[in-house]
Amino acid sequence: MPIKIADGLDAVSELKKEGIVTIGEKRARTQDIRPLHILILNLMPIKKPTEVQLLRLLGDTPLQLDVDFARIASRETTHTDRSYLDENYLTFDDIKDRKYDGFIITGAPVEKMPYEEVDYWPEMLKYFNWADSHVFSTLHFCWAAQAGLYRDYGVEKRILPRKLFGIYQYNLTLAYHPLLRGFDDRYFIPQSRHTSIDDKKVDATPELTVLSRSEENGINIISDKESRRIFVLGHFEYDLRTLEWEYKRDREKGLPIRLPENYYPYDDPQEKPRFVWCSYAHLFYHNWLNFVYQETPYSLDNLMPFNVHNPLHGN
Ligand SMILES: CC(=O)SCCNC(=O)CCNC(=O)[C@H](O)C(C)(C)COP(=O)(O)OP(=O)(O)OC[C@H]1O[C@@H](n2cnc3c(N)ncnc32)[C@H](O)[C@@H]1OP(=O)(O)O
Ligand SMILES: N[C@@H](CCO)C(=O)O
């Protein structure tokens, strides 16, 4: 939310340098305010915990949000009841003529497959194409971040020698960015993936800005220059015990899995995991919503299309 202060205060220029939005009397009197429209494409097989996790973070704002959930229609889901989805989720046909201020696309356990082998890849492409002209800012996380970077910028993924599994620290690479406002120099985020992206290709793509990275585990948050495409490799939204649940699941299945790194004190699974990413998760989503609120057009009819740069996709 912008703060209204007198135009003559010296703080105005100082805050502007930090990206903090201030408005004067005239703008405050004429400012049009409306709810933000957010769409979440939930690709997780077990959808309900992800709904709670995301709504918890989105709900932590004084702004009014209208949130819709969308699902894939071209593949039957086996882990979530069909009638629940029919009742509570929209399909592409429902949303194709609507416009949204913000669009969130979740991770999905399909990261080891080539994109084109994912049953719903053609439907993903429909969502991506639609978002170019119907969404102001799209936030992709985990697999969706990899898929979006591939589709928009031709960034490939690669299989890691072992699963990146635990809580990892990343350093900010920029002094000021609206999505990182209020962050410490470093933050923590859960990771649970078998793949990573081609960091060199990201660094060599002039349309992309890297917001954070670590020496050991590479790039973590990326944005295009206008923050209309945001890519987060990891899961800010995970609950305290989500990694523990995944660890036990894989162990019970006899899969090769080690304890989540940097998670239990003394690496002792009897201990309560350390919750060191919660405040960053709230701050990140808060910053994204604040950014969207400041920059999205009052009337979505005036939305400018997003320019896709990847020649692979002929856009
Ligand atoms: C890298 C990231 O983005 S991390 C985000 C993903 N994280 C998670 O999904 C964590 C929770 N998921 C899980 O724990 C597991 O996937 C489970 C327990 C739900 C399912 O495990 P299994 O039953 O062994 O796997 P299964 O072979 O049925 O496939 C699971 C999911 O993979 C996806 N999937 C599998 N094959 C395909 C395919 N060819 N095309 C598209 N999706 C596929 C589907 O989403 C499927 O779930 P759904 O049928 O309910 O939609
Ligand atoms: N986070 C996922 C990775 C699989 O793609 C899981 O462990 O289920």
Image (cartoon, rainbow, N blue to C red):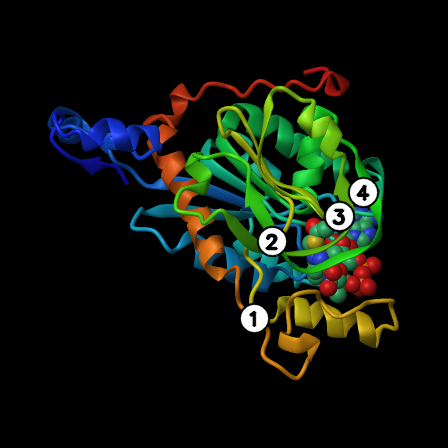
- Residue 177: percent from left, percent from top: 44, 34
The local crowd at label 1, few if under 14, some if 14 to 19, many if 20 or more residues have their Cα within 10 Å, is: few
**From what the image shows, is residue 71 above or below residue 155?**
below
State the CA–CA distance, disc 3 to disc 1: 37 Å
Give the mark, 4 or 2, whose residue is nearer the N terminus: 4
| Cα separation between marks 4 and 1 | 35 Å
Q: In the picture shown, does residue 314 fall above or below 97? A: above
List x then y, in percent, for residue 168: 64, 56
- For residue 274, which numbered disc appears in the image? 1
Q: Amino acid at mark 4?
A: Val
**Where is ligand 2, by quadrant?**
bottom right
Residue labelled with disc 4: 118
Q: Work out which quarter of the rendered image holds the N terminus and state it.
A: top left
- Residue located 57% across and 18% down the image: 307
N-terminal of the two: label 3 or label 1? 3
Quadrant assignment, res 256: bottom right
Q: Is residue 7 left or right of residue 281?
A: left
